[in-house]
Amino acid sequence: MNRDYVEAGNDMKSSLPASNGSSIILKNITKTFGHVVANNDVNLNVDAGTIHGIVGENGAGKSTLMNILFGLYQPNTGNIFIDQQPVVINSPDQSIALGIGMVHQHFMLVPTFTVLENVMLGNEGSFYLDKGSLLVKNQLNQLSNKYDLRVDPDSLISDLPVGMQQRVEILKALNRGAKILILDEPTGVLTPQETEGLFSILSLLKEKGVTIILITHKLKEIMRITEHVSVMRQGELVASFKTNKTSPEELAEKMVGRKVLLDVGKKQKKVGTSSLKVSNLTHYSKEGVKVLDDISFTISKGEILGVAGVAGNGQSELLDVLSGVESIQEGEIIVNSLKISCGDTWNPKVARSCSIAHVPEDRQKRGLVLSFSNYENIILGYHHQVRWMKGLILNGKKILKFFDKMGEQFDIRPRSPLISSSKLSGGNQQKLVLAREIESKPDILLVGQPTRGVDIGAIERIYGELLELRNQGTAILLVSVELDEIMALSDRIIVMNQGRLVGEVRGSDANELEIGKLMSGLEEELVN
């Protein structure tokens, strides 16, 4: 046996040094939801004052296990030990009282409240809010100074970028006395710069004695920031490693149960005629701010055009206009031979009729109706098409058969058509949206952040589907904050900064340094 990891079923004793933080032992944890076994006899040891990574495919049971530790779920069987003392956690309040805080994948903040109000929410302490708010503000300032979590307590959450909102979630937990901090896919919505900032904060928290559990699918991040990593697969903990004794390839194989091809192996191909032409596209926000500034480019059939840039530089607005979510204000687009300009009817239904499919950046707000079942969401937006009808009603058998096919092809878990899509993990929600839009076989696919919150095995599958669609002649516009992703998939790359196109490079010639300079505005090239 490799001495650098321990297979599941054995006691997992780390040789990492102890600190003044809190240690965690989860022993023989089993959790079921009906007939679905989410966690099966899981044993996990987390040493005090360390950063411990948990990786696994979507639906592997990572979030369920941590939700048990945080008191959102209760296990069917098993025991929890904090600092070697047995504890019973039946609610988040009990978890917080034990010094456990959790930052969820989708933040639990009230957008119309200030930072201070969000930190106080549910923990006001008394009806004398003015006195209480002054006390909490002082506590926030102390925490901000101690952990370098600078944020204005009087700022509205809705006015803060995502990275700052995450800081607020961390401050909420620390203000309630968290000695253990659980973070579920914390970098899924962050720019590379924000990720760097988060890692600096986590390192400082660890130095101050906080025990951190990091759930992520990004293996490079695991290798960089953690000291120990545990792998889950199909509800079981299958291995635990010292991070410096493993590799991304080994972790991927343990996660998926087979070797995973991390290199997409994209082959060059001859592109066809123009499928989408964008000319002098300019767009203003509701506040009158210019968010797109004279954008022009073309995408040919059988080509992937990547759009790189730090989030907030116009990429989202570009997708909104091209997909019909926003109308055209200035400029024009030509879809195949159809010209659309200011004053023309342009909405998502018209865009679909032009064979444009759209995978939105925010799957929960724009890609799905969370209260709908998987059965309903798998045809959402296409439900009026004749192929899904049987007379005047939906053809239930055909839709169920379609969901089964897509569930198998994209590995959607759990593969149940009747449960609401809100019950799926973020990664499985993403796979459902991708399955629906890719299967429509569009002439043009607009895809934003395709692998956000998705595990390594699913990423391999999604990349394969996108490349196959490209090889069949679809023109694909790919927006992603993941530079590795942009460079791996794109035939050409355009870079956006402050709503403008500042450069263009061939995919085969791209490198992180060059693109990074363009993204930051340090260098500007003429767009071809």
Image: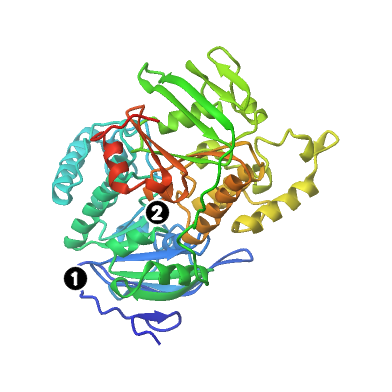
Amino acid of disc 1:
Ser
Residue reaching furthest to the top: 343
Looking at the image, which residue is at 67% across and 28% down? 353
Locate the N terminus and report the quarter of the image it occupies.
bottom left
Looking at the image, which residue is at 30% across and 31% down? 156
Is 36 situated left or right of 141 in this image?
Answer: right
Q: Earlier in the sequence, mark 2 or mark 1?
A: 1
Residue with the mark numbered 2:
185
Q: Nearer the viewer, residue 339 or 21?
A: 339
Give the x, y percent position of residue 433: 58, 45
Residue with the mark numbered 1:
19
Q: Nearer the viewer, residue 281 or 398?
A: 281
Is 294 situated left or right of 389 in this image?
Answer: left
Q: Is residue 38 above or below residue 277?
A: below
Is 305 situated left or right of 136 in this image?
Answer: right
Q: CA distance from mark 2 to mark 1?
A: 25 Å
Q: Nearer the viewer, residue 510 or 355?
A: 510
Is 239 situated left or right of 301 in this image?
Answer: left
Per the image, label 2 sits on a secondary structure element best described as loop
Locate the C terminus and report the quarter of the image it occupies.
top left
Amino acid of disc 2:
Glu
Give the x, y percent position of residue 297: 46, 28
Nearer to us of marks 2 and 1 is 2
Residue reaching furthest to the front: 270
